[in-house]
Image: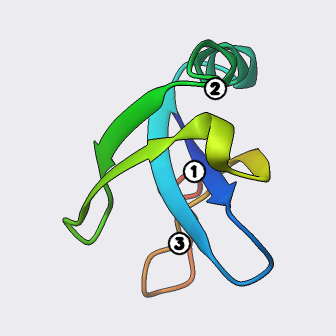
Amino acid sequence: MKEFKVTYFFDENHYIRRFIHLESQEEAERLVRSERDQYISFTDSRGIYHELHTGKVRTIQLSEYFRTDKKGKTKRDSH
């Protein structure tokens, strides 16, 4: 399972970020496309609940995410 970071940009200074876990980049892209122009809800890594309409954001950015621990190793390095 891979981790992906999805960032919803409202303007140059305001954005919301969420993390999803799927098998591939293609699956993550399909999910983002399937949520287009509708309300979605999620709780972020800080425990904050969000609801947003994906049609109201200016840009959606998707990328694979590699967490690093406090020793500087990525999640993949530790396996």
Of 62 and 8, the residue lying toward us:
8
N-term-proximal mark, 3 vs 2: 2
Can I make out residue 1 in this image? no
Question: Is label 2 in contact with label 1 (beta carbons under 8 Å)?
Answer: no
- Disc 3 and disc 2: Cα gap in Å? 25 Å
Colour mode of the rendering: rainbow
Judge depth for marks 2 and 1 and give the one in front.
Answer: 2
Instruction: Identify the residue under disc 1.
Output: 76
Which residue lies at the image location 23% right of the left edge and 66% below the top edge?
48
Of 47 and 70, the residue lying toward us:
47
N-term-proximal mark, 2 vs 1: 2
Three-letter amino acid code of the residue under disc 2: Val
* Side of 43 relative to 65 (left or right): left
In the rendered image, residue 73, in percent from the top left (x then y), is placed at 56, 73
Three-letter amino acid code of the residue under disc 3: Thr
Which residue lies at the image location 47% right of the left edge and 48% below the top edge?
19
* Side of 18 relative to 47 (left or right): right
Count of numbered circles in the view: 3
Local SS, label 3: loop
- Disc 1 and disc 3: Cα gap in Å? 9 Å
Three-letter amino acid code of the residue under disc 1: Arg
N-term-proximal mark, 1 vs 3: 3
Can I make out residue 77 in this image? yes
Local SS, label 2: helix
Which residue lies at the image location 74% right of the left edge and 16% below the top edge?
26
